[in-house]
Each structure stands twice: as C-alpha cells, then as structure tokens.
Amino acid sequence: MENPTIGITSDLRQALDCAHQHALLHLDSLDQTSVAATADLETLRAQIYKPLAQQRLAPEQVIEELVRDVGGGLLGSAGGRFFGWVIGGVLPAAMAADWLTSAWQQNAAMYACSPAASVVEETVGGWLKEILGLPSAASFALVSGCQMAHVTCLAAARHALLAKRGWDVEAEGLFGAPPIRILSSSERHGSFERAVRMLGFGHARIKLLPVDAQGRLVAEALSAELEKEPTAPTIVLLQAGDINIGAYDSFATLIPIARRHEAWVHVDGAFGLWAAASPRMKHLVAGVEQADSWATDGHKWLNVPFDSGFAFVADSESHRASLAIRAAYLTHATEARDQVEWNPEWSRRSRCFPAYAALRQLGRDGLAEVVERCCRHAHSLVMGIGALPGAEVLWEPTINQGLVRFLNPMSGAVEADHDRWTDEVIAKILTTGEAFFGGTTWHGRRAMRISVCNWRTSESDVARVVEAVARVLK
Ligand SMILES: Cc1ncc(COP(=O)(O)O)c(C=O)c1O
C-alpha cells in the first residue's frame, strides 16, 4: 500500500497555497458579490453531498472542490454590508493568528499541553479585565461563545449560592437542593435560558420582570420580587446591550438592590460590554464592575474568528470549585494556569491566539475607535433608512443596534399589514445582494434589525446600503 505520508510537505504547501488564494479572493470580492446566499437548499445539497469515496484525494483537490461546492451558500458576513444578528468580522492579525492556531495544533487544556497557549491566555484574560473595567482579581475562561460563557458563570453561581447553604452541588447535583430563583428582564437573550436549562435549574425557574421604555429592568420590580422571598438563593441576570435595541440595565441602581438579598448578579454583555472600551461610551456600563460574573464574546465586537467567548467571575474560588477536575494522567501545573480548571471543555482550540493578535493589532485606541465607528454607522444606517418614504425608525441606536419598520402603502393598511410588509421588504433587500438584515418582533411589531459590529463597515457601505433600500422601497 502506498505510504500516505509521502509528499506530505508538497501536499500541505499546495493545500495551504490554494486556501490562501481562495481566502484572499473571497475577502477581496466581498464588495462585488452578493451578501446574501444565492443558492437554495436543493442546489446546495446537490453541490455538496456526494457519497464518501473509498479512496483518498489530494488535499489541494479537496480544497478546490470545497470552495466550488459551497458556492452560492456563503453569506457575506465577513464584509461590511452584513447587519444580521450580531456578527463581527475578522481583523487581519486575528485571521492570520487563527491560521497559525491550526498549524500549531496546541491543545489549550493545560499548561503542560502548551505552555505558550497557557501564558497567552493568561495575558488575554488580564488585558480584557482592564479594557472591560472588571475587577483585576476576577477569574476568567476563554470559551466558545457567550452561550458557554453563561454556562461557565452560572456554574460558579450555582456553586456559590448552594455552598453557602451547606449544599455540595458538584457532589449531590440539584436533586433535593434548595431551589434557586432566577430573575431577569423580559429582554434576556435565549442563550441565558439555555444555560439555565443545561445546568439543571429548569427555565421555568426564570421569572421575567418588566422593562421601562428604554428596555431597562425596572428597579422597583426587581426589589419587589426579591422581597417576596428575601433570603432565597437567587441569580439576577442583567443586560449590557440587549439583542434588539442594545439596552443597558442600570447597574449602579440594580446591583446594590440585588446585593441586599445576597443575590448573584450575572451580566450578559455579549457585545454591549465592549462599550467599556470606549471613553465616550463607557458611561453605559457604569457600575457593571460590581456584578459577580460577566459573559461576553470575542467573535462580535473584538472581530476575531468564531469560537470566541469570555467568561469572568469575581469569586474565583467558586469558579474553580465548579469546574476544576483532577485526573491521574494529567500533569497539573503548580504555578502556571491550567485552563481546564476554569473551562467547561477539556481538549480545546487555542482560541487565545487570535484574541491576543486582535488586541495587539488594535491597541486600546483602535478598539475604542472600532466600537465608536460601528455605533456611528449603525446610527447613520437607521436614520438614513428610517428617513426613506415608507420607512419608520422604531429605535434610534444608542450603540450599534437599531430598528426600522416598513409601512405597507396599501390604503387602510393595519398593523398586521405593516408587519407582513416589513418581512417582505427585508426579503427583497436580501435578493438584491446589497445588504443583509434580519427581522425581529419588538413590542409586538415586526421590525428590521440593524446591527453593526464589523470593523470593515465603511461610510461608503452605509451610503450604498441606504441607496439599495431606497431602490427596493421604490
Ligand atoms: C445579547 C446576547 N447574548 C448572548 C448571545 C449568544 O452569544 P453566542 O452566539 O456567542 O453564544 C448573543 C448572540 O447574539 C447576544 O446578542
């Protein structure tokens, strides 16, 4: 049988060269190509599915065919005209470091598996705490995204709240444990709910509390709810930037209220926590440092490749107690930081390298500038589109999120017609390939969400997109 390792260097070089060329081609063509997918499901299945062959293929051929077969099914989310969900781009240094991460193939489980990854991660954690204005003693974990950051933080919360009541949740689980009450505003993100489910609390335990006109949790409602069972173990979720309008709860008011009842305060700051990086915007997160745990993302506003979230916990002992594990075959560090002590995963990608590279590429000023620029572009887009005939601004951005809605021109149109029309206009915009937006229901009405998080979005992108929407509305 042929030795499969023969030609490994030339195979690798050809495959990498091929990927390099295609990557540049993709990124360079983003301004000219459709930002929405152009192939439908049937076409994509026909292109991509093939019986798995018995024989090997040359790596370069695999890459060539992969690029060919996914054609029409990729979104332009790496580019500057993508405003769906909350999706960041990728900074050059972060992308290059991500390629090296694959080449280096370091298992970031523990110091012994990759001393460099452990120290880079330690460095990134420290930088992030400074930039986000979090306590310097807080522990942290680099996880796959905000979803797993919630899980990490809430595992620490579960430990701390139950240990205080004499219950060892790591040993006994939640069966028979004192019930934990969970309070959040109605604007929480579904990923919080899933974290609650995964940790065995049950999402029926979440009590949703009202928000004010700015989308902020009402202090009196939180206070009244806490008073109902003043000593019950409680988790309070606060938002630093909700998914629709980027609303910030008033941390300086709400955290002291929660503190009076010894509740654990967790902050979902998937994108909004990054306001702390901007001297102009950091007032939005005033008081956030008093919370117990914080979850955020790298793959949104830090513009690193996907698979990047960050969890921070003020009570590092509870964090470690909830996740740490010892095994005879592992080589635990005594002085260095073993990531497995803080992380829900075991073997894991060294996602610290792209985060490190992104932070170094931007520096503090660059990061603040990206955050402020995205907010400016979000504002121009919302106000520009909202000023078009047949459009209406539902939420003028305070940060990088806004909402518009389209009014059905039919005479006698009612709310339901505007709702349908809004979805139709969004779909029409996607078919132009000029911009990508998503829809949402906000305060009972359909709306188009506009979220700007990509460092590549430029003023000319904004002008081009407003013109494209104007053409659709005509
Ligand atoms: C406010 C908020 N929280 C949590 C999440 C979940 O983040 P991730 O998809 O990185 O897990 C998102 C994603 O958009 C979000 O906007």
Image (cartoon, rainbow, N blue to C red):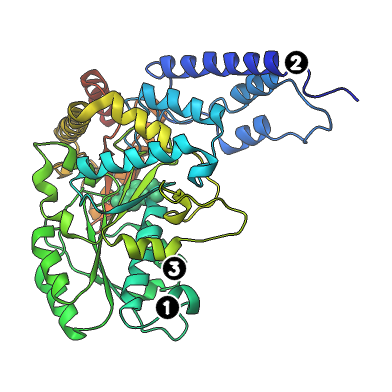
Task: Tell me which residue sits at (54%, 29%) in the image.
Answer: 104
Looking at this view, is 418 or 144 the one in front?
Answer: 144
Quadrant of the frame with the N terminus? top right
- Measured from the top left, where is residue 196 in percent x and y? 39, 67
Q: Which residue is mark 3?
A: 199
Mark 3 closeness class: few <14, some 14–19, many ≥20 residues within 10 Å: some
**Callout 1: CB less than 8 Å from ligand 1:** no
**Along the polypeptide, which appears first: circle 2 or circle 1?**
2
Nearer the observer: mark 3 or 2; the answer is: 2
Inspect this view and state whether residue 89 appears: no
* Residue 239 position (above or below residue 17): below
Q: Which residue is mark 2?
A: 7
Q: Which residue is mark 1?
A: 168
Looking at this view, is 93 or 185 the one in front?
Answer: 93
Label 1's element? loop
Give the amino acid type for the residue marked by disc 3 in the picture. Answer: Leu
Nearer the observer: mark 1 or 3; the answer is: 1
Q: Spatial distance from mark 3 to mark 2, Cα to Cα? A: 48 Å
Q: Residue furthest front?
A: 334
Q: Spatial distance from mark 2 to mark 1, Cα to Cα? A: 55 Å
Give the amino acid type for the residue marked by disc 2 in the picture. Answer: Gly
Say left or right for 404 vs 357: left
**Along the polypeptide, which appears first: circle 1 or circle 3?**
1
Quadrant of the frame with the C terminus? top left
- Measured from the top left, where is residue 253 in percent x and y? 8, 63
Task: Tell me which residue sits at (39%, 58%) in the image.
Answer: 152
Say left or right for 276 vs 452: left
Q: Are marks 3 and 2 in contact (CB under 8 Å)?
A: no
Label 3's element? loop
- Measured from the top left, where is residue 79 in percent x and y? 36, 25
**Along the polypeptide, which appears first: circle 3 or circle 2?**
2
Inspect this view and state whether residue 175 appears: yes
